[in-house]
Amino acid sequence: MNSVFLISDNVITSLGFTTRENAAKMREKCSGVMLSEDSFISPIPFYASLVNTPLLEEAFGSLNAQAEYTRLEKMLITSISEALRSANVDPSSDTTLFIISTAKGNIDLLEERLKGRFPKERLKAAVMAKVVSSFFKNPNPPLVVSNACISGSVSLLLGKRLLEGGRYKNIVVAGGDVISEFTVSGFQSFKAIGSGPCRPYDEARDGISLGEGAATVILSVVPGPKGAIALKGGAVTNDANHISGPSRTGEGLFLAINGALNDASLAPEEIDYISGHGTATNYNDEMESKAIHSARLEQVPMNSLKGYIGHTLGAAGIAESVMATYSMKHDILFATAGFSKMGVTQPVNVLSDNLEKKVKKVLKTAAGFGGCNAALIFEKQ
């Protein structure tokens, strides 16, 4: 079975347009979650992490695109282009595949101000993905993963398994979502949006902060330089418990964690760091803490990055995995923005400050509406 390596990456969020820019802001504990008063999105002001539109247009403009693209397509194409700059990968080769992760795709095209600007077919995630892969002249039909908030993590695991099968040499895994009227109103109907910037695992948490952005990982069977990061294992489960909420016991996420550890042939005590999901909703953080206890990982340092970049939905699993691998390469674990006092009944080792630590093996967790769960294991070679 082939080993699968992360050979290049990029993250675009409110904090910056490269992985390095995002990391620099997180080191400084700078949050991109701000109060938005955009009445086109919501008549009620809300806290969110929004990508700077003029900077996006400038970055995308440098690519000299010959067609018109949606906001999400611009984010994805810009992110993929940046990741390709430092990878010896031909995106137009038939041995390269594109996997696109998104929760809602071009959902903003439903808004009145955008109606008629693009064909209705662009609302379909498969069409959007083809538009993106066609920009890079890739001959293969792209795959789309849309499984709520675990979409990005599932995409990475799918890429790993396809590479292990030997059909492809490289897979471009990119995820993204935009903040739209549809998205915000949906989370508001669940009363899930926090009254301020989100506070993962904290006693005073009261909901999520939405975020938008795009993230890319290029997976390959060809290892990078010394210290390369390998995707060693993963697992996906579903609680089959409730139409939207997670299981209160955390059993589904525990099964995903346990499955990922088994897939990577690791014991719990070998994990050095956990990149948590940490949405700052009461149910998610409580459930996640129970799952981590069940897996005997409660002493392992962990954080959530959503206090910095919000919940980026289809990009979340990819963006947070990229930042976890940055931590592995640079021996730095980021503080959990917004966290000050433990607010879950099963205490876990949440980082309230940056921590310099050598990290070799990392667990990434993810959970989503409908009780879907995912876990990934990364290892520094």
Image: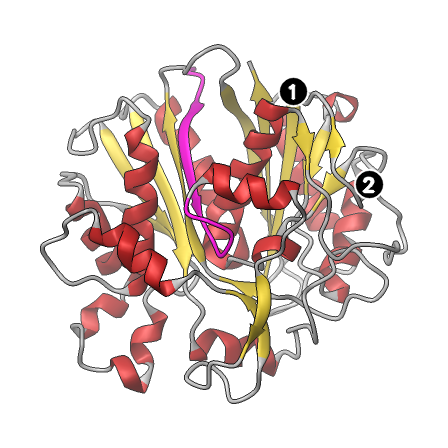
Q: In which quarter of the image is residue 364?
A: top right
Residue 71 appears in the rendering: yes
Please state which amino acid type lies under the numbered disc 2: Ser
Which residue: 50% across, 45% down?
A: 319
Quadrant including the C terminus: top right
How packed is label 2: few (under 14 Cα within 10 Å), some, or many (20 or more)?
some
232 within the magenta span: no
Which numbered circle lies on residue 332? none
Q: Nearer the viewer, residue 68 or 246?
A: 68
Which residue: 51% across, 57% down?
A: 312
> Under tag 1, what secondary structure?
loop
In the orientation shown, which residue stands out farthest toward the left? 66
Which residue: 71% across, 59% down?
A: 284
Residue 236 appears in the rendering: no
Residue 313: x and y in percent read 50, 58
Q: Which of marks 2 and 1 is in front?
A: 1
**Would residue 26 appear left or right of 249 to someone viewing this image?**
left
**Would residue 143 appear left or right of 278 to someone viewing this image?**
left
Magenta range: 1-17
Q: Which of 136 and 139 is in front in this view?
A: 136
The residue under label 1 is 360
Vertical relation: 68 (above or below) 85: below
Which residue: 75% across, 64% down?
A: 283
* Upstream in sequence: badge 2 or badge 1: 2
The residue under label 2 is 294
Q: Number of callouts in the render?
A: 2
